[in-house]
Amino acid sequence: ESVVDDEQGTGAKARIPGYRVAGKTGTANRVDPATGKYHGYTSSFAGFAPADKPRITVYCAIQNATKGSYFGGQICGPIYKQVMEFALKTLQVPPTGAGAANLPVTFTP
């Protein structure tokens, strides 16, 4: 959830007011099969909502974005948001009652 919920998270553009959203951004180099060298990017965002009781999953992937950034959260986050908002409304999924858990994230090598 922190990828979306945190203002500094890479998936902040996928945030949907009133719902807890969990997701993961992705950005990967693409290999040109003709040359074997990197050429372009795959940008992605995968997420589900509501995070506390998942009902809907949406995945977005864009190959070689031509405008602006190529990062997954920047390119696919807004697309995910539009599709998920439509799905939540269409399926009449009620807004989330509780806020995000805000659990600390730690890493120990």
Image (tube, grey):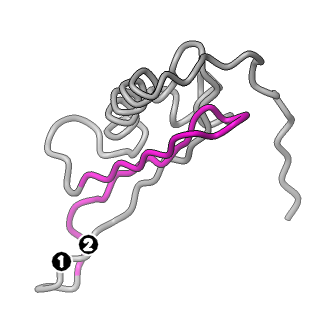
Query: Is 22 drawn above or below residue 34 in the view shown?
Result: above
Question: What is the span of residues highlighted in magenta in the rendered image?
Answer: 37-62
Q: Horizontal and vertical percent for residue 15?
A: 52, 24
For label 1, the SS is loop
| Left/right of residue 100 with respect to residue 23 in the rendered view | right
Q: Do the residues bearing badges 1 and 2 touch, measured as CB atoms within 8 Å?
A: yes
Q: Horizontal and vertical percent for residue 39?
A: 20, 67
Q: Amino acid at mark 2?
A: Tyr
Q: Amino acid at mark 1?
A: Asp
| Residue matched to label 1 | 32
Q: Residue at x 52, y 44 (%)?
A: 47
| Left/right of residue 82 with respect to residue 63 in the rendered view | right
Choose between 101 and 98: the one closer to the eye: 98
Crowding near pointer 1: few (<14 within 10 Å), some, many (20+)? few
Q: Residue at x 85, y 65 (%)?
A: 109
Q: Horizontal and vertical percent for residue 106?
A: 85, 47
Q: Residue at x 54, y 13 (%)?
A: 17
Residue 38 part of the magenta-drawn span? yes
Whichever of labels 1 and 2 marks the residue nearer the N terminus, that label is 1
Choose between 24 and 56: the one closer to the eye: 56
Q: In the picture, residue 80 is in which quadrant? A: top left
Query: Is 109 drawn above or below residue 86 in the view shown?
Result: below
Residue 17 part of the magenta-drawn span? no
| Residue matched to label 2 | 38
